Amino acid sequence: MTEKKKLQIALYWGAACGGCDVAVLDTNEFILEVAAAADIRFWPIAVDGKYADVEAMADAELDLTIFDGAVRNSENEYVAKLLRRKSKILVAFGACAHMGGIPGLANLVKREEILTAAYLTNASIEPGNRTVPYHETYVDGVKAEIPGFQKRVYQLADIVGGNDFVPGPVDRMKLEIPVFYKRVYRLADIVDVDYFVPGCPPAPEQVRNVLLAVVQGELPPRKSVVGASDRTVCDDCKRSKEEKKIKRFFRPFEIIQDSKRCLLEQGILCMGSATRSGCGVRCPNSNQGCRGCYGPAPGVRDQGAKFLSAVASIIDSKDPAEIDEILSQLPDFAAYAYRFGMPASILQRSHRS
């Protein structure tokens, strides 16, 4: 009997926190089933591997790539395009790959403002050492004379990455870091994506669903959102819902909540009405408002705009001054409503000159 060929899979993180990779590990003993059914060919956070190993693969050699994280710099873009070429199926895994995620909030400011805050006005950096890093620079290199080799400039990867480096009479070395883009992109802005798995992070059960669907050949139609529902978080929330009329908004720690009553009716921001379900209503069940990490509910074009409409409709006043006072109690609304989806929104980014 011919032994069934193992799946060839890769996992990669772009601009992300690493939580999605932890979600994969949180499948616990299921990860052993994955190891039995698949060869993990590339997973920088967990196994040794170089970009050169992926570059050497044949196109479409990988059966599945799970890509988490947004695209923030030239390295993210390069690897996204490389893995797209090498993979039969590419999955945007988690809120950052799906919609831009938390990194996408950087689109509310200009790149120069971020670099200034990080390098020029950062109090943790001594004033004499404050400088914005360049994409490339040259430094004194190693000088090891080996006859027969011509003088050349080596990249840092040649020195520390083992990329066929042969020491020669080098007197300068070129150091490179990825180009920091002006904005954050979701994965689908850069390459063609086959499936989307929402969540920050996705529930471990979703990881199981994706891998099992590939193993069993039971994938849904291309471009589907996998591991989520066609309902809203509000639809699945068991809290009682009556009339929503708000005179004041609260942070969750500012009041003693009624654990059975709709959070928004108590003045606590909750994006459940604008958000796709499938998470198990984890945040409302923990007395926290839905954060919106599963993305817009089916039929919703812009999650933040939908939520803004919901909030505006529950303010219990027709007096402009009182309305302004009520709205002043809200946190940074753009950052709240687009916490996970600014690059996927109609706005996409700040349009200041």
Image (spheres, grey):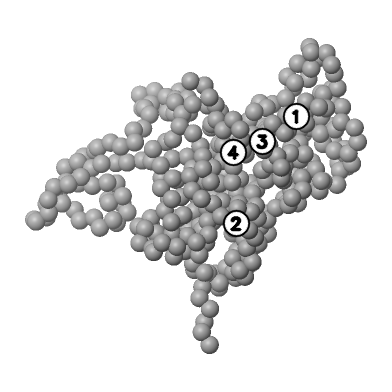
**Which mark is first along the chain, 4 or 1?**
1
- At 55% from the left and 38% from the top, the residue drawn is 103
Identify the mark at residue 344; answer none if there is no mark: 4
Res. 32 image quadrant? bottom right
Q: Residues within 10 Å of mark 2 (few under 14, many from 20)?
A: few
Circles 2 and 1 in contact, beta carbons < 8 Å:
no
- Assign a secondary structure to mark 4: helix
Measured Cα–Cα span from mark 4 to mark 2: 19 Å
Measured Cα–Cα span from mark 4 to mark 3: 8 Å
- Assign a secondary structure to mark 1: helix
Question: What kind of residue is marked 4?
Answer: Ala
Residue 296 visible? The answer is: yes
- At 43% from the left and 56% from the top, the residue drawn is 85
**Which mark is first along the chain, 3 or 2?**
2
Measured Cα–Cα span from mark 1 to mark 4: 18 Å
Front one among 251 and 110: 110
Query: Dot 1 corresponds to which residue?
Result: 309
Res. 344 image quadrant? top right
Query: Dot 2 corresponds to which residue?
Result: 222
Q: Is residue 70 left or right of residue 149?
A: right
